[in-house]
Image (tube, rainbow, N blue to C red):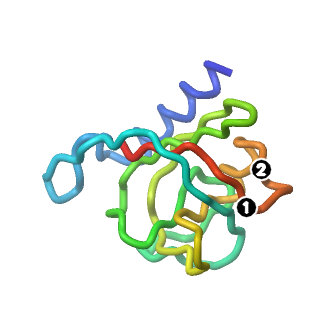
Amino acid sequence: MRQCVLVVLSLLFFANPVLADQRRDGTTAKVSSERTTTVSWYNHGTKTANGEKYNPHALTVAHKSLPFGTIVKFTNPDNNHTVYARVNDRGPYIRGREFDLSMKCAQLLGFKDKGVMKLKVQIL
């Protein structure tokens, strides 16, 4: 499991040249405290809001207002699985949900069959 987390972190940082504490515009991001929120996952669309082609197998996430490139840590409290995902899209547009995760994130966190779940979230 540790090797998987290290691989995921490496891929996120090499695929995205912006480190977690520095944004594309040069400002510094504050790491938020961990909290619990409702999330869902999605597997549709051809283009994301930042112009990338949607890839259901990438560790990406949609949020209504976080800057593109922001890294978010998600933890499933039921099984303690953790995923780090990069914001590259906008949404969800369903009341009561804060994040839409890619299909791969949902699989790794173990809630793909549920569709919607409360996860621990930390914005890095």
Identified at 74% across, 36% down, the residue is 78
Q: Quadrant of the C terminus?
A: top left
Query: Residue 24: which disc?
Result: none
Identified at 58% across, 78% down, the residue is 95
Quadrant of res 81? top right
Horizontal side, residue 115 vs residue 37: left or right: right
For the image, the number of numbered tags is 2
Which residue ends up furthest to the right in the rendered image? 113
Query: Residue 111: which disc?
Result: 2
Q: Quadrant of the N terminus?
A: top right
Real-space CA distance between mark 2 and mark 1, rounded to the nearest whole angstrom: 7 Å
Identified at 46% across, 52% down, the residue is 86
Q: How far from the left and from the top, in percent, is residue 52?
A: 48, 69
Q: Are marks 2 and 1 in contact (CB under 8 Å)?
A: yes
With respect to residue 19, does 101 lie above or below?
below
Horizontal side, residue 21 vs residue 69: left or right: left
With respect to residue 90, does 98 lie above or below?
above
Instruction: Inspect the image, locate mark 1, and give the three-letter code of the amino acid beneath it.
Output: Val
Read off the residue under disc 1. Answer: 116
Give the class, few, some or many, for how many residues have Cα within 10 Å of label 2's Cα (few <14, many ≥20): some
SS state under label 2: loop
